[in-house]
Image (cartoon, rainbow, N blue to C red):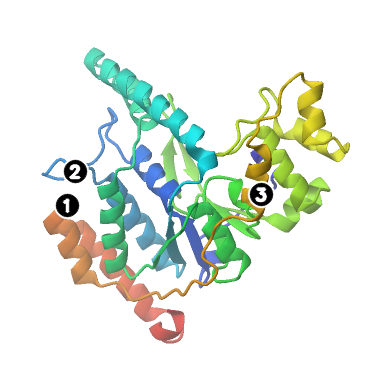
Amino acid sequence: MGEIVPRQEVSLESLRGLSVAIDAFNALYQFLSIIRGHDGTPLKNRKGEVTSHLSGIFFRCCNLLKFGVRPVFVLDGEPPRLKKAEISRRRASRAEARAKYEEALARGEAEEARKFAQASTTLEEYMVETSVRLLDAMGIPVVQAPSEGEAQAAHMAKSEVVWAAASQDYDSLLFGAPRLVRNVAITGRRKLPNKPSYVEVKPELVVLEEVLKQNGISQDQLVTIGLLVGTDFTPGVRGLGPKTALKLVKQGKTVDEIYRERGLEKPPELDDARDFFTKPKVLEDVDLEWRAMDVEAVVKYLRDEHDFSEERVRKAAEEVATAQRGMKGSLSKWL
């Protein structure tokens, strides 16, 4: 979808005072994939539990909070039936990557091992639980979606509970998020795959109205393009990219015609997927409350239970506390 989606680079400063609903599982997978040692080994505490996600949440959210950005994390609920095939495919892909990771480690190929380690990332239940505990101590609200977190975040943006949805995926636009912020949780230097160089990742803003206007399409047509290219719920047409899909849709081609002209059978779940994007299962009413960071609670949790450096944690937490106290107007007004 990225090829037909206009984006503009923004700064965290420009998001000051605005709230963003972060697709939590999307962000956690990013943290677990990126925050690793040179050979792909994730951060762990003395109990052998992975803590890369906690490091990501804490330091990235501290950065957001210092700029006055108000994050809320939205957790996935029960996955829709449509996603079962995709979940099975991802599970098999991760298992294959895990095997290749072990082989690369045995050969002493650290760079190769890191690549496969990132692809083998899994999100365990305890990782979600520890994330929620940390977010609570940081004063950041968490919303439990009944189904897809991305759909819930988009709904919250549509209903103006938050200013924007935040995710790396463009499916947020198919769910109707009026604004999508990308890279909000992974801003900073990122190593390029298989290269000894880095790139600076900056937040990007996508405005749905501009996507539709620039491409001359409706929201329904955008959903059609997503279904043709492929989403978490549909495989898409092999070899059909966003630009070609856009061209066909603007010619008035229907999904049935596009599949038929390619000698393909339309997946039976396609119509259900369209319905899910247009009428997803979400919480209609959401109340959010941001609190000031509890510095001592954060330090105690990360230091005592997950072996983080007290000095680093306290320094970052106190910088946030100082920034919150110094924001224009009262802290209660900001919260």
Tell me the quadrant of the picture where the C terminus can be found: bottom left
Q: Choose the circle earlier in sequence order: 2 or 1.
A: 2
Residue 49 disc label: 2
Q: Amino acid at mark 1?
A: His
Tell me the quadrant of the picture where the N terminus can be found: top right
Q: Amino acid at mark 3?
A: Asp
Residue of label 1: 306
**Where residue 253 sits in the image (x, y, percent)?**
85, 35
Asked if marks 2 and 1 touch (Cβ < 8 Å), the reply is yes
Q: Quadrant of residue 157?
A: bottom right
User: CA–CA distance between discs 1 and 3?
Assistant: 43 Å
Q: Nearer the viewer, residue 163 or 222?
A: 222
Can the viewer see residue 88 in this picture? yes
Residue 275 disc label: 3
Residue 222 left/right relative to 150: right
Asked if marks 1 and 3 touch (Cβ < 8 Å), the reply is no
Residue 18 left/right relative to 116: right
Q: Nearer the viewer, residue 50 or 76?
A: 76
Q: Residue at x 52, y 53 (%)?
A: 150
**Where residue 197 sits in the image (x, y, percent)?**
43, 31
Mark in front: 1 vs 3 = 3
